[in-house]
Image (tube, coloured by chain):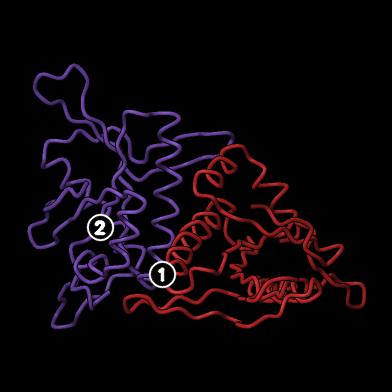
Chain colours: A purple, B red
Amino acid sequence: MLSQGYRTGQIQGFRLLLSNSVEHLLFQSDIRSALEKEGWLITHDPLFIKVEELDFFIDLAGEKILAAEKDGFKIAVEIKSFIGASDLASFYIALGQFLSYRSALRKKQPNRILYLAINQDVYNNFFSNRFIQELIAEHQLKLLIFDAIQQGIILWKE
Amino acid sequence: MLSQGYRTGQIQGFRLLLSNSVEHLLFQSDIRSALEKEGWLITHDPLFIKVEELDFFIDLAGEKILAAEKDGFKIAVEIKSFIGASDLASFYIALGQFLSYRSALRKKQPNRILYLAINQDVYNNFFSNRFIQELIAEHQLKLLIFDAIQQGIILWKE
């Protein structure tokens, strides 16, 4: 959305507004690139998990080999652009997905840590709300904050 | 949806398919009537709560005066028809809303108990899944199961 100041372009003086779904795909691609820039190997795009006949598709999964570790550190990332619906409506979906995915991962891939990736503008404008902060703490959501200017991840919030 | 066998009509031999949003409104009205039939006084339709500048609208709120009680027993009901989107997509929203509303109620109306109202078909076909049952237990969702044939609530599941 324009108010978030995220990806707009100029064509012959006219502002190019990208559709919501294109914006969302571009945000996904930005997160993937940002993770790769930090040395993550993207292993799944998306990560598919089946639990009790239910199919879960988590946006990304990656791995990083750290010194003195035999196995890599593994993450899964659910990406939410918060474009289109209201912030609260987007948050309901993000919360429900995160908790479902986390429980699914605990069953199938207990060593993989789940993060919710959001834009810095969304973090500053919506997630800073005290009640949203309390919900995040209550349900122990881990966040990954992306900055559109630097095109990089500026915060891993445990 | 047709596969749920829920509310269809016949007009001059043609099946009348109601749109998803109309179906959803009818389901809301069914739940309200069923609660009233059980002696609940519907006090809010919807119930509005404001927490930290965020506006929450919970579908229904009601009260029942029981013997030997000074104050009535108070409930709030989030109604989910599971019509339109996939069951999992509907579940993500229901879970995210339920947990947000419950936390909001704890702050503003701690004596009001929140329930998620669903159709019996949805309960039998989707909520019976073992993983969904585990998620419901993990997050302590309280359910209210509606039967379209009897037009009544057949189960309060704590």
The answer to whether residue B55 is seen in the rendering is yes
Q: Nearer the viewer, residue B123 or B113?
A: B113
Give me the residue at 61% from left, 61% from top: B116
Q: Nearer the viewer, residue B55 or A86?
A: B55
Disc 2 crowd rating (10 Å Cα; few below 14, some 14-19, many 20+) is: many
- The residue to which callout 1 is attached is B107
Looking at the rendering, which quadrant does residue A67 occupy?
top left
Quarter containing the N terminus of chain A: bottom left
Disc 1 crowd rating (10 Å Cα; few below 14, some 14-19, many 20+) is: some
Q: CA distance from mark 2 to mark 1?
A: 27 Å
**Does A72 sit left or right of B95 as displayed?**
left
Seen in the picture, residue A139 relative to A56 is either above or below; the reply is: below
Q: Nearer the viewer, residue A10 or B92?
A: B92
Please give the label number shown on residue A118. 2
Amino acid bearing label 2: Ile
Q: Which percent across, then down, holds residue A17?
A: 26, 75
Most extreme residue toward the right, as rendered?
A: B12
Amino acid bearing label 1: Lys
The answer to whether residue B62 is seen in the rendering is no
Disc 1 is placed on an element classified as: helix
* Disc 2: host chain: A
Discs 2 and 1 lie in a common subunit: no
Residue contact between numbered discs 2 and 1, judged by CB atoms under 8 Å: no
**Does A11 sit left or right of B85 as displayed?**
left
Q: Which percent across, then down, holds residue A139?
A: 36, 51
Please give the label number shown on residue B97. none
